[in-house]
Amino acid sequence: MKKIAAMLLAGGLAMSSAQAGLQVQWEGLDGFVHTDMSTIFPSATFGDGQYLAQLIWTPDNFIADAWIGGAVDPGSNEVIIDSASILNPGDVYGPLPAQNYAGLFVGGYIYARVFDVGSDNPANITVGSAYYAGPLVLAVDNADPGVNQVYNIHQSTADAMFPGQGFDGFGTDVLNQQVVPEPTVLALAALGLGVVAVRRFRRS
């Protein structure tokens, strides 16, 4: 049932005022930085001045790890319902301007995730890519087209991560998480190591 609801939500079905609706204005105007609090965002590794932000719906009060390519963990029933490619011409604290999403309401939670890679090519999101996950909040049933659920990605994580280091009140959020390998990737890696071990054993 949850998967059916998630599929409907991801489709962004058109709705009338008589229907239940999920309408979100999501933003991160204060920007994002790396854990060293100085590296320009996005990383010069990709150098195209773009990064990827995602608005995600989940049926559970839990945020799963990000996967390679910016995918969600299929075991979590999370659904990417909106995404934005943001141009950052060099501002240290790359902001996410307000984005608007409208879709069918299904009870659950929403949160946003921001990756430090070139958003024009999600293939750049590999194991170890840095990202930030915003706070998890209840999805609001707001069918009125003129009323948005305002979702601010920021929750001043710098205050908690660097207590007493002069970042109190610092609104910018820190990319302090890393993409983890998918289970299939780990299984293939283990298989490859096993083959190598067998070959070495036969040679010795």
Image (cartoon, rainbow, N blue to C red):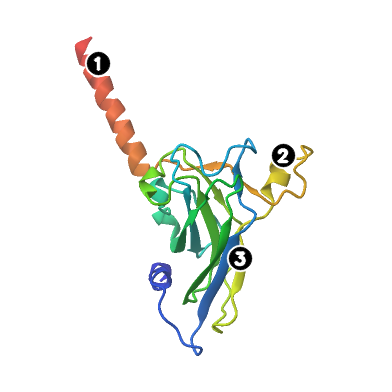
Q: Position of residue 22 (x, y in %)?
A: 52, 75
Query: Which quarter shows the N terminus?
Result: bottom left
Nearer to us of marks 1 and 3 is 3
Labels 1, 2: front one: 2
Residues at marks 2 and 3 touching, judged by CB atoms closer than 8 Å: no
**In the image as oriented, which residue stretches furthest toward the front?**
89
Look at 52% across and 70% down and name the residue there. Answer: 100
Type of amino acid at the residue the image marks with label 2: Phe
The image shows residue 61, relative to residue 46, as above or below, that is below
Q: Position of residue 81 (x, y in %)?
A: 45, 65
Q: Which residue is pictured at 78% across the width and 40% down the height?
A: 166
Q: What residue type is disc 3 on? A: Tyr
Q: Which residue is mark 3?
A: 151
Q: CA distance from mark 1 to mark 3?
A: 55 Å
Residue drawn at 62 percent across, 38 percent down: 35
Q: Which residue is mark 2?
A: 162
Inspect the image, locate mark 1, and give the three-letter code of the amino acid beneath it. Answer: Arg
Q: Is residue 61 visible?
A: no
Element on which disc 2 rests: loop
User: What residue did someone put label 1 on?
Assistant: 200
Quick check: marks 1 and 3 in contact, CB under 8 Å? no
Q: Is residue 149 above or below residue 80?
A: below
Above/below status of 10 relative to 89: below
